[in-house]
Amino acid sequence: MPLQPFLPGLSAPATPSRASHMSASLLHYPDVSSGVLCENAKTLGHASELLVDSVFARLGIPVASFAEHSPFDRMIWIGSNCLRVQVKGRHRMTDGGYHFDIKRGYQRGPNGTREYDRGDFDVLALVGLPHDIVKFTASWSKSHVIRGHEIPGLRNRPGASLQQALDALGLSGTTPADCAI
């Protein structure tokens, strides 16, 4: 099969780029080393956000993404309510579940990590990326867990935990089907 020619002024890279190496290193995800997970943290974080977007799309919920350094990743509209959503992803189960420490920043970054302020977001989307699951919660806690026994239910009814989060926020009369911009 012939290769498509490059646009005028653009040429193929002389050697494989680091980006292509990183992509190849994820071919066996989730069975990759911790080093590969760290090297690809941004890419995998983006994958978690896209999975959450997919759940919102399947539920008919309008969604908008926000800048990387915002205290929330997404904004959704449920009826006349606008909710801020923070997405957190995990790649490995420990002690029978996906464990989440809810902090801002990156521990190896120049500012390290810090706690969120109470009003930074309304809903938390916890992602178990290897199982393609999302658990929504409005519970304010420094840590959360998706237990292994929850996985089948989260997979079979991706909107159920969102409905529980809406109920906890006092939006029990509102369902994801009431969404509109």
Image (cartoon, helix red, strand yellow):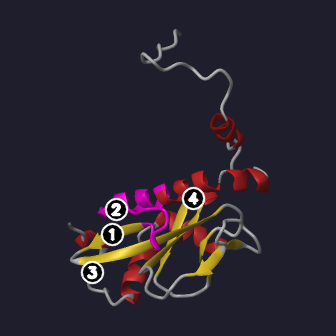
Mark 1 burial class by Cα count in 10 Å: few <14, some 14-19, many 20+: many
CA gap, disc 4 and disc 1: 19 Å
Q: Nearer the viewer, mark 3 or mark 2?
A: 2
Where's residue 49, x and y in %? 49, 59
Q: Which residues are magenta?
A: 50-73
Res 174 label: 3
* Residue 91 in the image, given as x and y percentages of width and height: 67, 61
The residue at the point 36 percent across, 58 percent down is 58
Q: CA distance from mark 3 to mark 2?
A: 20 Å
Residue at figure coordinates x 49%, y 67% from the top left: 69
Say few, some or many: other residues with alpha carbon within 10 Å of mark 3 (under 14 / 14 to 19 / 20 or more).
Answer: some
The type of residue carrying mark 1 is: Ile
Marks 3/1: CA–CA distance: 13 Å
- From the viewer's perspective, tell me whether residue 167 is left or right of residue 149: left
Kind of residue at disc 3:
Thr
State if disc 2 and disc 1 touch (CB < 8 Å).
yes
The quarter of the image holding the C terminus is bottom left
- Sequence order check, earlier mark of 3 and 1: 1
Give the quarter of the image for residue 163. Answer: bottom left
Residue annotated with mark 1: 76
Q: Secondary structure at mark 3?
A: loop
Q: Which mark identifies residue 18?
A: none
Which element type, helix, strand or loop, lies under badge 4? Answer: helix
Residue drawn at x 59%, y 55% is: 42
Secondary structure beneath dot 2 equals strand
Find the distance from the CA under tag 4 to the CA under tag 3: 29 Å
Q: Write down the residue under mark 4.
A: 45
Where 160 falls versus 2 (above or below)?
below
Q: Are marks 4 and 2 in contact (CB under 8 Å)?
A: no
Picture mark count: 4
Q: Which residue is mark 2?
A: 64
